[in-house]
Image: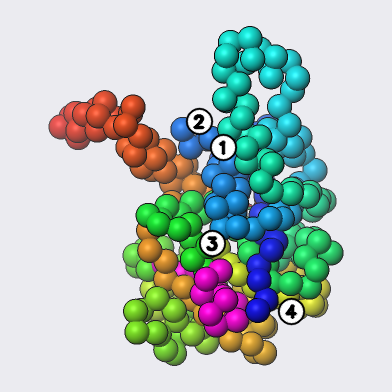
């Protein structure tokens, strides 16, 4: 049985929706409480039993590398304050996964970013995680759940979620022709980027988790850049669909689009409300805000 040993996280985009902060801080370093988003995503990979990670970075990713290698002076200070556990939090994660970096010199689209990882994937299926999408599941992490499905059906699996009408025209929407008994797996027949509501074949949107078979890389190499000279992953997946089956996996759990400021705020409130030290005060405060408006 083919297994999934490598994850790819592309973080070389410009993060324009978070300017001006992203002019000096990569978007994946923006925090959900005390952890940068990249930490949560890598934790998900580790908890999904994947051992290798390829991070596709832009030219200016020193902050990300630095996070995983805290300076000696910071370690010394924390040691003197008996707060080494703060550093351990990072090292624990770091030691459970091999992180390799590849550079995408110019942000030429998500598909182009994924293609940069090709030589580090040994012609095996890969997990692709977009850090803009934070997904909280109650049991196993979503990537693990998708790998389980991949093992069962041996076909590429894409996370999908039901979205309200007003979001349809800004997302990738699937057309499907069957679903399993539990309404969890949908056989995708078409991927349509940003359809108008009246042309949308469903309200199921592609969400940033993919388990993709290795043939995607040859297709990406031959995918022509579209608008803005970008190579889109959706176009390459549409071509893959001509040769192989791809399934949509309707995941259980909460989804946050932290690629937008409002999504990041919601994620922070959600995770803070799960922490006993914040829950009571946060909820009371929110309730009071509610009574003001
Ligand atoms: P997005 O297009 O949603 O994010 O890419 P962005 O470009 O960073 O942000 P905005 O739209 O300007 O605000 C989804 C993911 O793909 C990566 C991004 O870093 C993000 O994690 N990406 C996108 C690349 O690595 N390279 C690219 O050329 C484009």
79, above or below 126, in the image:
above
Are the residues tagged 1 and 4 within 8 Å (C-beta)? no
258, above or below 180, in the image:
above
The residue lying at 62 percent from left, 26 percent from top is 87
- Mark 1–mark 3 Cα distance, whole angstroms, equals 19 Å
SS category of the residue bearing label 2: loop
**Closest to the observer: 45 or 128?**
45
Label annotation for residue 215: 4
Are the residues tagged 3 and 2 within 8 Å (C-beta)? no
Are the residues tagged 1 and 3 within 8 Å (C-beta)? no
Residue at mark 2? 34
Q: Residues within 10 Å of mark 1 (few under 14, many from 20)?
A: some
Residue at mark 1? 36
Are the residues tagged 1 and 2 within 8 Å (C-beta)? no
Q: Residues within 10 Å of mark 2 (few under 14, many from 20)?
A: few
- Mark 3–mark 2 Cα distance, whole angstroms, equals 23 Å
Q: Residues within 10 Å of mark 4 (few under 14, many from 20)?
A: some
SS category of the residue bearing label 4: helix
Residue at mark 3? 143
Q: Residue 71: within the magenta? A: no
Q: Which residues are magenta?
A: 147-161
User: Is residue 252 at all visible to an observer of this figure?
Assistant: yes
The residue lying at 73 percent from left, 15 percent from top is 73
Circle 1 or circle 3, nearest the eye = 3
């Amino acid at each position: 049985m083919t297994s999934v040993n490598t994850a790819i996280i592309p973080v070389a985009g410009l993060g324009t929706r978070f300017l001006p902060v992203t002019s000096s801080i990569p978007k994946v370093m923006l925090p959900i409480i005390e952890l940068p988003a990249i930490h949560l995503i890598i934790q998900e990979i580790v908890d999904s039993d994947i051992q290798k990670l390829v991070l596709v970075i832009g030219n200016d990713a020193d902050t990300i590398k630095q996070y995983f290698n805290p300076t000696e002076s910071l370690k010394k200070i924390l040691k003197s304050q008996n707060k080494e556990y703060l550093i351990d939090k990072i090292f624990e994660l770091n030691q459970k996964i091999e992180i390799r970096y590849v550079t995408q010199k110019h942000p030429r689209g998500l598909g182009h970013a994924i293609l940069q990882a090709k030589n580090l994937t040994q012609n095996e299926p890969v997990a692709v995680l977009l850090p803009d999408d934070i997904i909280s599941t109650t049991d196993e992490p979503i990537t693990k759940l998708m790998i389980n499905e991949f093992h069962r059906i041996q076909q590429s699996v894409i996370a999908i979620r039901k979205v309200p009408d007003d979001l349809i025209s800004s997302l990738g929407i699937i057309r499907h022709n069957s679903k399993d008994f539990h309404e969890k797996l949908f056989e995708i027949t078409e991927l349509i980027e940003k359809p108008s509501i009246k042309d949308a074949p469903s309200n199921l949107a592609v969400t940033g988790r993919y388990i993709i078979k290795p043939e995607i890389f040859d297709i990406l190499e031959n995918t022509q850049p579209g608008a803005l000279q970008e190579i889109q992953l959706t176009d390459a997946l549409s071509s893959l669909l001509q040769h192989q089956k791809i399934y949509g996996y309707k995941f259980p759990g909460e989804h946050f689009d932290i690629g937008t400021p409002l999504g990041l705020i919601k994620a922070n409130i959600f995770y803070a409300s799960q922490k006993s030290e914040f829950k009571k005060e946060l909820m009371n405060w929110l309730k009071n805000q509610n009574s003001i408006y």
